[in-house]
């Protein structure tokens, strides 16, 4: 059950911050926490993850830069999570590895959709403080979820299930709000033209 909890926790958290998840898995591998493959603890792997986590830490705090960063990572986060999922389940059959990769990538996509749509909504506000607060909260969520996944894998499964439902509902709600706002803009533009 430890690998399943770690797979689910790292998959969903990767949708928020792939590089921080990778770095935390490296630290866990080095310290012997959980069932983390040794590849995560390799020095070059950890250095690259730390550099990219640092870049994301800065990019995530700057309004509109974070939207560009999220756009680029719409593909990178789910694919990276799929690789992490495959590595976490890699010592089992190829079918289990494939399922682990797909589940992890799908969870990352769920989290990424909620993060990216929330960031678009937050960037609509004129002050920059909410963006920084949200970014720090996301980083703390990733660290907390990864700690939970390493220490309490069964509980992590329940938490990830709740996060998936919440993230899906939030994404749908924000999409509907944005769609309604665009309709209002189109109506105003049409009335100005006529």
Image (spheres, grey):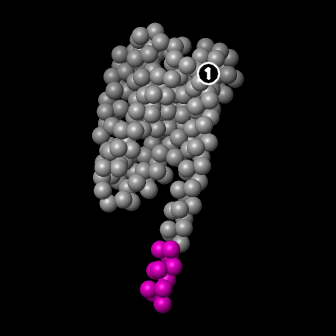
Q: Residue at x 37, y 42 (%)?
A: 135
Residue 79 in the image, given as x and y percentages of width and height: 53, 35
Q: Residue at x 50, y 69 (%)?
A: 182
Q: Is residue 188 magenta?
A: yes
* Relative height, residue 39 to residue 60 (above, below): above
Q: Is residue 71 visible?
A: no
* Relative height, residue 145 to residue 192 (above, below): above
Q: Quadrant of the N terminus?
A: top right
Front-lying residue, 31 or 131: 131
Element carrying mark 1 = helix
Q: Residue at x 40, y 35 (%)?
A: 139
Give the tally of numbered discs: 1
Q: Is residue 182 left or right of residue 103?
A: left
Q: Is residue 125 left or right of residue 39?
A: left
Q: Residues within 10 Å of mark 1 (few under 14, many from 20)?
A: some
Magenta segment, principal secondary structure?
helix
* Relative height, residue 54 to residue 112 (above, below): above
Instruction: Please give the residue where the numbered disc 1 appears in the rendered image.
Output: 154
Residue 129 in the image, given as x and y percentages of width and height: 30, 49
* Relative height, residue 84 to residue 55 (above, below): above
Residue 65 in the image, given as x and y percentages of width and height: 33, 50
Q: Is residue 111 left or right of residue 103?
A: left
Residue 2 in the image, given as x and y percentages of width and height: 59, 16
Q: Is residue 110 magenta?
A: no
Q: Residue at x 57, y 38 (%)?
A: 163
Q: Is residue 133 visible?
A: yes
Which stretch appears magenta?
184-194
């Amino acid at each position: 059950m430890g690998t399943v909890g770690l797979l689910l926790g790292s998959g969903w958290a990767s949708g928020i911050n792939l590089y921080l998840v990778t770095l935390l898995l490296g630290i866990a591998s080095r310290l012997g926490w959980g069932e983390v493959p040794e590849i995560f603890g390799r020095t070059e792997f950890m250095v690259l993850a730390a550099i990219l986590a640092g870049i994301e830490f800065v990019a995530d705090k700057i309004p509109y830069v974070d939207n560009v960063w999220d756009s680029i990572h719409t593909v990178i986060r789910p694919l990276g999570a799929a690789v992490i999922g495959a590595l976490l389940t890699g010592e089992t059959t190829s079918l289990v590895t494939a399922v682990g990769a797909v589940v992890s990538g799908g969870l990352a996509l769920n989290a990424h959709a909620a993060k990216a749509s929330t960031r678009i909504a937050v960037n609509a506000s004129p002050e920059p403080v909410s963006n920084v607060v949200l970014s720090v909260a996301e980083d703390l969520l990733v660290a907390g979820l990864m700690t939970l996944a390493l220490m309490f894998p069964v509980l992590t499964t329940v938490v990830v299930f709740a996060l998936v439902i919440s993230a899906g509902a939030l994404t749908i709600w924000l999409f509907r709000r944005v769609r309604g706002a665009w309709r209002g803009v189109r109506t105003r533009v049409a009335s100005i033209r006529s």
